Amino acid sequence: MKKILLSVTFIANVVVAFAQPTISASGVNPVIGDQLIMATATYVSPGNSGASQTWNLSSMTSSASNTYTAVATSSTPNGSSFPNSNVALGSGGGNYSYYKTSSSSFQNYGFNSGTTVMSYSDPEDFLRFPCAFNNTYSDSWAVTFVNTYTFYRTGTTTVTADSYGTLITPDGTFNNVLRVHFVQNYQDSAYIPSYGTYLETYNNDEYMWYLNGNHFPIAFVYTLTYSTGTSQGGSYMSNVLGVDEPSVLKSFTVFPNPVSSDLHFDINMKENQNIEIQLFNEIGSLVATPVSDNANTGRNEYNVHVGDLPEGIYFARIILDGTLTSTRRFTVSR
């Protein structure tokens, strides 16, 4: 067994590989139990479209993050308002976004925010599968909701897989990524007494980067233009639980949990791999890269001293041959 002390040195494994990917439903659709930490970030240019691109979003800065959990629609307070949805994403506070996942599509069925419930009468196709470079489609959608007054929202979404290549984020480098250009044009209308007819139009121009095995976009940037102004922003994946584990990894166990001093890693491999272990805190900041090693076939065991970390929730992530493979959550408690 190897005894490893924490080091804050970040060791980047960058493997340049340009392959034309096809994302699938099983590769990117959220699954109940998945958990994601997404950092809210500044806007950066989405870069070029086309084959074999490299997009550098590493200049994104973030001061906040949200943790999202995928749960069964029926388990949410407003689940009965979304009878065709089978999975919901929540970030706390009782607010959820509702979706339907299938082998052919990932559909948006609406959301609730406070007492406002927006259940789509005509769902919005976020993705259609399989999705590959140059695939494109348009989809119309509609929803009626009440926010003091009754509003009617109608729109059209155009989705184009406009490029593929390597994506660099503040959290790491990802190969064989497919970029999706996502354009929403929609309007809200309502009749308001003493005001008359209210009409607001929107254009959301958004780029999302997908990688099979990650059940959420790795990153996105957007520009939202509406009748009275414009806003820009972005986000990137700080950590994800629920990525598909590769066949080369037989098992990955982290214990004890909670931990007060030494955290034990038991990683069982089917073949030799370059391995890196990274530790993140709850807001997605890298706190240490305590292991960088050549893992052998069979069991590889490491002890990492985490007694100097503040109490709280952390994530241990392993990277095999430069590719994110799996994440485990643990708690430091004394």
Image: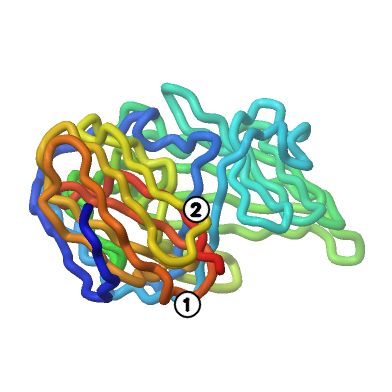
Q: Name the residue under label 1.
A: 63
Which residue is depicted at the point 32% across and 62% down?
Answer: 304
The three-letter code of the residue at mark 2 reads Asn
Q: Quadrant of the C terminus?
A: bottom right
Disc 2 from disc 1: Cα separation:
28 Å
Image position, residue 253 (x, y; %)? 37, 43
Q: Mark 2 points at which residue?
A: 257
Badge 2 vs badge 1, beta-carbon distance below 8 Å = no
- Outermost residue on the top side: it is 103
Q: Can residue 312 be seen here? A: yes
Which residue is depicted at the point 78% across and 42% down?
Answer: 77
Kindly report which numbered mark, 2 or 1, lies closer to the viewer in this rendering: 2
322 relative position to 116: left or right? left
Q: Which quadrant holds residue 83?
A: top right
Seen from the viewer's position, the closer of residues 151 and 238 is: 238
- Outermost residue on the front side: it is 1
Seen from the viewer's position, the closer of residues 49 and 6 is: 6
Q: How crowded is mark 2: few (under 14 residues within 10 Å), some or many (20 or more)?
A: few
Seen from the viewer's position, the closer of residues 244 and 177 is: 244
